[in-house]
Image: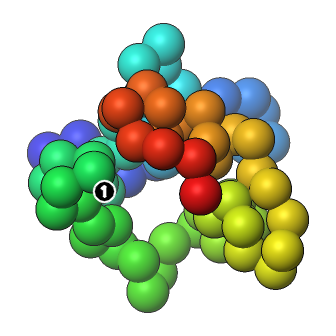
Amino acid sequence: SRPLTEQISPFHRCMSGTNQKNPRCIALAGTPGKNACCTIYENRSSTCREFAMSGENGEVNEACNRARAKYGLTPL
């Protein structure tokens, strides 16, 4: 099986599958917009914890909205 993370620099790692042109995290199960979920949510990395859902805390996250748009989902 693939490791959960991959090295992207001497000091940084990312979730496997996220450093691609069409990213898909190794920990994502299901289909975005239908029944997707993170299989390691309680143990997710600090990077994931810091990536706020658009609208969370009253702030727009354009990166979240761009990711949603790739799957035909409306912005939050």
Q: Which residue is mark 1?
A: 27
Q: Is residue 76 left or right of residue 50?
A: left
Q: Residue furthest bottom?
A: 42
Task: Name the spot of residue 50 as percent of width and height, x first.
Answer: 74, 66
**Res. 52 image quadrant:** bottom right
* Residue appearing at x 41%, y 77% in the figure: 41
Assign a secondary structure to mark 1. Answer: loop
* Residue appearing at x 33%, y 67% in the figure: 38
Q: Is residue 45 above or below residue 70?
A: below
Task: Name the spot of residue 70 as percent of width and height, x first.
Answer: 43, 27
Q: Residues within 10 Å of mark 1 (few under 14, many from 20)?
A: some
- Name the colour scheme: rainbow
Is any atom of residue 68 visible in this view?
Answer: yes
* Residue appearing at x 41%, y 19% in the figure: 22
Q: Is residue 68 left or right of residue 58?
A: left
Q: Is residue 29 above or below residue 41?
A: above
Type of amino acid under label 1: Ala
Q: Is residue 41 left or right of residue 13?
A: left
Quadrant in which the N terminus appears: top left
Q: Is residue 36 above or below residue 7?
A: below
Q: How many marks?
A: 1
* Residue appearing at x 23%, y 41% in the figure: 2
Quadrant in which the C terminus appears: bottom right
Task: Name the spot of residue 69 as percent of width and height, x first.
Answer: 49, 32
Is any atom of residue 7 visible in this view?
Answer: no
Nearest to the observer: residue 63 or residue 38: 63
Q: Residue furthest top?
A: 21
Task: Name the spot of residue 18 as percent of width and height, x first.
Answer: 48, 34
Q: Is residue 51 above or below residue 7?
A: below
